[in-house]
Image (tube, grey):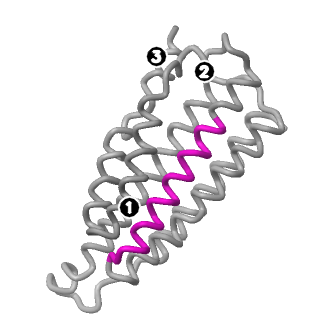
Amino acid sequence: MTKGRMEAFTDGVIAVAITIMVLDMKVPARADLASLAAVAPTFLVYVLAYVNVAIFWNNHHHMLHASEHVDGRVLWANLFLLFWITLVPFALRWINESSVAALPTASYGVVLLMSAFGYQALERGLIAVNGPQSKLAIAIGADWKETGSMLAYVAGVALAFVNPWISIAIYVAVAVIWFVPDRRIESGLKA
């Protein structure tokens, strides 16, 4: 399989996940501000989930752009990543239907954590197949941002049982950190 075909497949899967997320949103019961305010938490959780999926997609695109070859290990790592990304709509729906309860919020953190593991496995697989002197390998260097994000997700999962909104704040903080595509890769592509 070519890198382009894997990227096109990934784009399609992520597009479906985003579509499912928006279709699961409930509209306000009435046409007034009170009804709109009642669904505001649902909308905010949707925005967070959308941004998280978009961040994975955006960084995935940059990572593949810095790579030339894929192999079976890379394909499986990509499928592992996509499996967890496709669970975002499920976790989002559970959070919304539970009114931001502890277990659903923790489950969303698990989905994010496992997606991060999948992304890291994909990154390592691409570096292995493209070599230690590849653009990607040189650009990545130390993975402090990835490791810090995973630790934050673990904290978010645990703290969901103290207060789910603390977890949501942690998930937002990680999203803010990753909102701009990985500069290491962008800088490496310019070199």
Nearest to the observer: residue 39 or residue 27 = 39
Element type at marker 2?
A: helix
Q: Is residue 188 above or below residue 88?
A: above
Nearest to the observer: residue 159 or residue 71 = 159
Q: Main secondary structure of the magenta part?
A: helix
Residue at (55%, 31%) from the top-left corner? 62
Is disc 2 surrounded by few (<14), some (14 to 19) or many (20+) residues within 10 Å?
many
Q: Which mark is residue 158?
A: 1
* Residue sitting farthest toward the bottom: 30
Residue 128 among those drawn in magenta: no
Residue at (22%, 80%) from the top-left corner? 36
**Pointer 2 residue:** 136
Task: Name the quadrant of the N terminus.
Answer: top right
Q: Which residues are magenta?
A: 100-122
Earlier residue among tags 3 and 1? 1
- CA gap between label 2 and label 3 equals 10 Å
> What is the three-letter code of the residue carrying label 2?
Leu
Element type at marker 1?
A: helix
> What is the three-letter code of the residue carrying label 1?
Ala
- CA gap between label 3 and label 1 equals 35 Å
Element type at marker 3?
A: helix
Residue at (52%, 8%) from the top-left corner? 191
**Pointer 3 residue:** 187
* Residue sitting farthest toward the top: 191
Marks 2/3 in contact by CB < 8 Å: the verdict is: no
* Residue sitting farthest toward the left: 33
Earlier residue among tags 1 and 2? 2
